[in-house]
Amino acid sequence: MATFSYSITQAFILFPFLALFITLPYIFFQYHKYGSLSFYRTILIYAFLLYLLCAYFLVILPLPTVEEVSLMTTPSYNLIPFQFVSEIFHLTSFQISDFATYFPTMQNPVFYESFFNLLLTVPFGIYMRYYFGLSFKKTFFYSFCLSLFFEFTQLTGLYYIYPRSYRVFDVDDLILNTSGGLIGYGLGVLCTKFLPTREEIDQRALKRGENVSFLRRTLAFLADLCFFFILSSASIYFLFQFGVRSKALALFLLFFWAILYYIVLTSLLRGKTLGMKFLKLTFSSKFDHIHLHQLVSYFFFFWFEYLFLPIIILFCAFVLFRHGMISDVVWNFIQIGIFSIMVFVYILSFLKRLFRMPLWYEKVSRLEIISNISTIK
């Protein structure tokens, strides 16, 4: 029992780091497919991942040392089916007609290890039916494959990290794990009756995806920023490799890629940047269609507010400071002032986004970002 609790504890310790690693890709995928995040779906998926991690750790932990494994002489496999039944009858005091022997038998490792192998895949079977909507045959197949993966892990000594297996490849475990998945499939019918179905979860998510959330818009912006940075950095690096190290040329390339990516490509994609296209967003124009000058004004004023304006003010103040026209106190005051103003602007923009109010550069360009998630239902 101590081994089981140790393995589960280690899984719970590691899971937050695993969740941190997969959260951003998960969010991108959910917004790409549904246009929104479903809290209920997130709980189900993360709980499923935690379950798989616990099950895997129960199979491999605790890890022995290589020296300990090299000295082992125990059998590496058991190919006799239902040997656990024979062991229960011969190695315990179990008598079917004597209820007094039931509880002592349950405390015996021969019984509870087999019982836990049966329980190990019950949640897997429940998920296969309830969330993934698989049939009985497919649940049987995937439960068997999961069990076979566990047994392969044991047989190979954790994928040949160890010189031999430190746990037994047991055909009984295949039988019990697969049976546990099928039991879970049977129990899954309770979930389909008392919990929202996968289709209901999807429809609710798609309904919310018709609105553009602040996080969804931010993810599209970050995705576009990454694409732009990769393209511009690659071209500048390519020139540097040929000995061209002109700062003016580097600035020109940044400007060139900005025009090409944010204006030309968005126009070719009919009002979508690559990030917006992935997250099912598009520009909507007050006119019959999106004009080129609208995209120019939108992105110019957008970058002007968040990037160009503070840089210009800081650059001018720095020039005055270097020429002794302003004191250190004034220079520090300007930096603090610009920082405070920008924080105020960001907070104000965030609040407007939160309450779905248009920003000034959207009014000037007569463009707004809307969701086209309803067109892909």
Image (cartoon, helix red, strand yellow):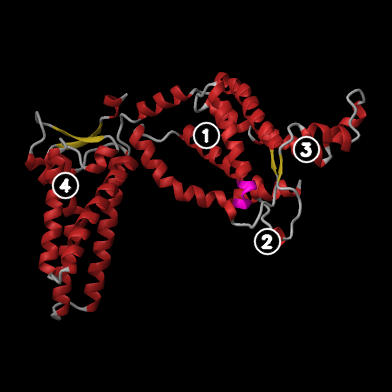
Q: Is residue 278 magenta?
A: no
- Classified by dominant secondary structure, the portion drawn in magenta counts as helix
Q: Calculate the distance from the C-alpha at mark 3 to the C-alpha at mark 1.
A: 28 Å
Which quadrant holds the N terminus?
Answer: top right
Kindly indicate whether the residue at mark 3 contacts the one at mark 4 (C-beta within 8 angstroms).
no
Using residue 111 as the reference point, say whether residue 295 is left or right of it. Answer: left
**Rendered location of residue 125, percent (x, y):** 59, 29
- Is residue 155 in the magenta section? yes
Q: CA distance from mark 4 to mark 3?
A: 62 Å
Q: Residue at x 24, y 55 (%)?
A: 230
Label 4 – label 2 distance at C-alpha: 56 Å
- Under circle 1, the secondary element is helix
Sort mark 1 into few (<14), some (14-19) or many (20+) by Cα contacts within 10 Å: some
Q: Residue at x 64, y 49 (%)?
A: 60
What amino acid type should be assigned to the residue bearing mark 4?
A: Tyr
Front: mark 4 or 3: 3
Q: Mark 1 highlights which residue?
A: 44
- Residue visible at 12% across and 42% down? 295
Q: Secondary structure at mark 3?
A: helix
Q: Which residue does the numbered mark 2 point to in the structure image?
A: 65
Eyeballing the image, is 85 above or below 306? above
**Lower sequence index among marks 4 and 1:** 1
Q: Which residues are magenta?
A: 153-158
First of labels 3, 2 by sequence position: 2
Which label is found at residue 112? 3
The numbered mark at residue 262 is 4
